Image: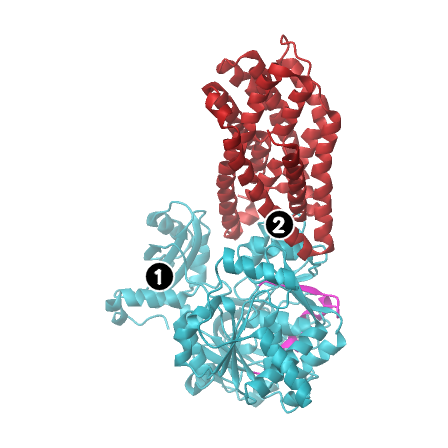
Chain colours: A cyan, B red
Amino acid sequence: MESPQDAAALPRDRRPWVHHYGAIPADLPPPAHSNLAALIHSSAERFAARRAFTSCMPNGMNGSLSYARVDEASDAFAVYLREELGLAPGSRVAVQLPNCLSYPVVAFGILKAGCVLVNTNPLYAVSEMIHQFRDSGAEALIIIDLFVDKLPEVLPHTAIRHVVVASLAQFFPPVVRQVVQAVLRYWNRVIPPCQVKATELGLALAEGRRLRQAQGIEVAGYWRDLVPESLAALQYTGGTTGIAKGAMLSHGNLLTNVSQIEAMAGSHISDGEECVLTALPLYHIFAFSVNLLAFFKHGAHNVLVPNPRPIQNLQRAIENYPVSWISGVNTLFNALLNEEWFSLYPPRKLRAAAAGGTALHAAVAERWEKVTGTPLVEGYGLTESSPVLSFNPLVGVRKPGSIGIPVPGTEVRLVDSRGKPVAPGEPGELTARGPQVMQGYWQQPEASAEALRDGWLYTGDIAAMDEDGYLRIVDRKKDLILVSGFNVYPNEVEDCIALLEAVQEVGVIGVPDPDTGEAVRAYIVPRDALDRDTVKAHCRQHLARYKVPKQIAFVDELPKSPVGKVLRKDLRAEYLKNHPETATAGSPAC
Amino acid sequence: MLTPLEETLLAFMMAVIMLGMGSSLTFKDFRIALRHPQAIGIGFASQYLFMPLLAFLIGRALQLPPLQAVSLILMGCVPGGATSNIFAYFSKSLVGLSILMTVCSTLLAVVMVPLVLAVYTSGIDAAFQIPSANIIAVLGVLLVPTLLGMWLRRRNANVGACTELVGGILGVVVIVFLIATWVPRNWQLLMTTGAEVYLAAVGLGLCGFIIGYGFSRAARLPPLKARTVSLETGIQNGPLAVLIVTLSFTGETQQQMLLIPVMYGLFIVITSTVVTFYYRRCSLREELARDQAKVEAATQGR
């Protein structure tokens, strides 16, 4: 294997994608700020009077914060964390909020205080919350009032000493706030009583403001010493192995990724003029880096939607605001295209849309461009890389089905199982190196050493690169199924089964098999009546024999991640739990 | 019947409800409604071709006395009422389309109602007065608040959303109020009315829903639009029919002729509520299905 020094001097001909950069700089200049807090503050000063965030409920009720107000409120929150709660720089603070106005205030406040942000999925079950809070060692938690009923069970097992509660309608105009709260509390009955000691966010901010004034605190002092290497966030990722690990993302990691995103998309972003629709959850790294950080830097107006399902929930947001950018996942774009109000009258100001998270279907991208007249480009990344590693250029060649070319400052190599680069065009594990790659997993030296080797991040994704440097994901390495020594990629089998009209969704995994080592097993959510023989006959028509599923199970739904990725590991775990006798028959697909 | 005060109050509440409906709309909704202009033609045909014919046939089948038969036909050929827009809203149908259809059928009522009545009631000596001033007033109560609501939403989304919420709540209040007060108020009437009048009053609305839906589907309108047309066809402007009768007749004749419109007015609120619950379920199911629709299905329009 070549040394990192060799790789750093990767010649241009080893980076064929550079020819497709066009106006994009091949080498990335270092970020102008040394930490995220400085970036947030300077952007807030620059665009002070502009609207920064609007939270739009499905019925159109909304609240907004200007850049100046986000800055002021997050300053107050930083003071509250440091002075009132007495948190030290580097203390972990967990945030469990859906998309709402409190999110940017709280997240920016944590970064400004020099603390470490621990994004947590608000829908987590008690056991998941306990694991994440214990593992991160979080000392404070900011949670949405909808889920406080889990706290009496969670808190005793964690180091959390302070709880701050926010509401969906926080920062809304007073009357509207009362209406939204009343509807949630008395009509939907989704706000449980809080049975632990907690401070309401509004009161915490008031206290922060009071302390700031009384003690004459200069908030910038909190972040002055933060350097690019300082830890900014622990972003938990399940990976494919099960137990969630905290990817350590530094200020430098995230700042670089912001620069990389703007290098790729800058041609379609005008400072202070964009309006971006944020339907994906901000606690997820994709929306966090792209929508929250990158667009904030450019003075965009961010329209936050608390819950994009059903898709109708987005209608008022899209009708009431001049949306110019949308970020999302395949299912979101597909669902939008299926709505008459969207496909007949797409947003007039729309400039571009970015897809990530899961594979974007070529058919969706094609139809999107036809309907809206704007590009929908797919990118690729991991939590471990802040997240963007590659993107299709907005200007120039876009290849359908491709995850694009590596972003500036990023090196990508495809390697075989021994870590040797594969021949051009051949599939191999995607490894990447760049300033956006995490520092490692929090308190997991072994897992870190496994993922980061000689500075290269091993993504666990098998990809192929064409002669132009465009990448195409073949499948997850860990999902690869070995049937009698033959490689079967689950994606290929899934795509084939999904062609059947009666199939709503499908997930394919490998399970231990006494005859073939592993066997292909398909989980199908049917939309109409369907039997196993039909599926097998269909697969036999389109696939080599060894790829045809040996086992087929019909289920009501598939386990999915917050962005809608089918979780094959959960399917495998459940199968092994129900069939313990098979676990020794062959090695599972790892 | 309602007292003048109650009528004024009801008119005021209707205006507030329409303000709320308007706040749920943008001009885009009307453009979407007009994308299938045949929907309005289909609604028009259901309204002025099928409904009077249906009323005529029901009258024949139940062997209603002439005066009641005529008032049933009158009931069949009056335009759609503003209540149809409220039910369209609650059933998650296309409020924009519903309002457009109400406006069109009401505008044309001045010509169409006498024309249709002349066709079906020839041989019965009846001089109907069509109160064109009142029809214009109906349009005013419908259109002015709707446009105002749309403007409110445009100016301030929060004011629009709150108005919509108030309009929606008031809509439920009015529906409950109409049902709850009508029955005790007209207990005597309900007890003395014959079964055939019940059948005629309930049947006209119900058949209207079915025909409106079936005809729209036969004409290849998508289900959502068909449901909107269905509600529009079944729900007639009862108060307008009452007004036409009171203007055109006096004494005993008037009383006899009022029976059907008054009975219709009660039962249409009840049947519409039931149908609305059903349609709403259909709309939600379709929303969910669209949400999960496959990419391939979307691309190839299968």
Where B119 sits versus A482, above or below?
Answer: above
Is B106 positioned to the left or the right of B175 in the image? right
- Residue A111 position within the rendered picture, expressed as x and y whole percent measured from the top left: 60, 82
Q: Within the image, what quadrant is residue A400 found in?
A: bottom right
Same-chain check, marks 2 and 1 = no
Where B125 sits versus A498, above or below?
Answer: above
Residue A257: say if magenta. Answer: yes
Residue at 47 percent of width and 77 percent of height: A197
Q: Are marks 2 and 1 in contact (CB under 8 Å)?
A: no
Furthest residue toward left: A581
Q: Which chain carries label 2?
A: B
The residues colored magenta run A250-279
Residue A539: say if magenta. Answer: no
- Residue A459 position within the rendered picture, expressed as x and y whole percent measured from the top left: 49, 76
- Residue B145 position within the rendered picture, expressed as x and y whole percent measured from the top left: 71, 43
Furthest residue toward top: B123
Badge 1 amino acid: Val
Badge 2 amino acid: Val
Q: Name the residue under label 1.
A: A520
Task: Tell me the mark number nearer the camera, choosing from 2 and 1.
Answer: 2
**Label 2, residues with CA under 10 Å away: few <14, some 14-19, many ≥20:** some
Q: Name the residue under label 2.
A: B166
Q: Say which quadrant the C terminus of chain A sits in.
A: bottom left
Residue A240 makes an appearance in the image: no
Q: Nearer the viewer, residue A346 or A193?
A: A193
- Residue B161 position within the rendered picture, expressed as x and y whole percent measured from the top left: 64, 53
**Label 1, residues with CA under 10 Å away: few <14, some 14-19, many ≥20:** many
Secondary structure state at the residue bearing disc 2: helix
Q: Which chain carries label 1?
A: A
Secondary structure state at the residue bearing disc 1: strand
Q: Nearer the viewer, residue A33 or B193?
A: B193
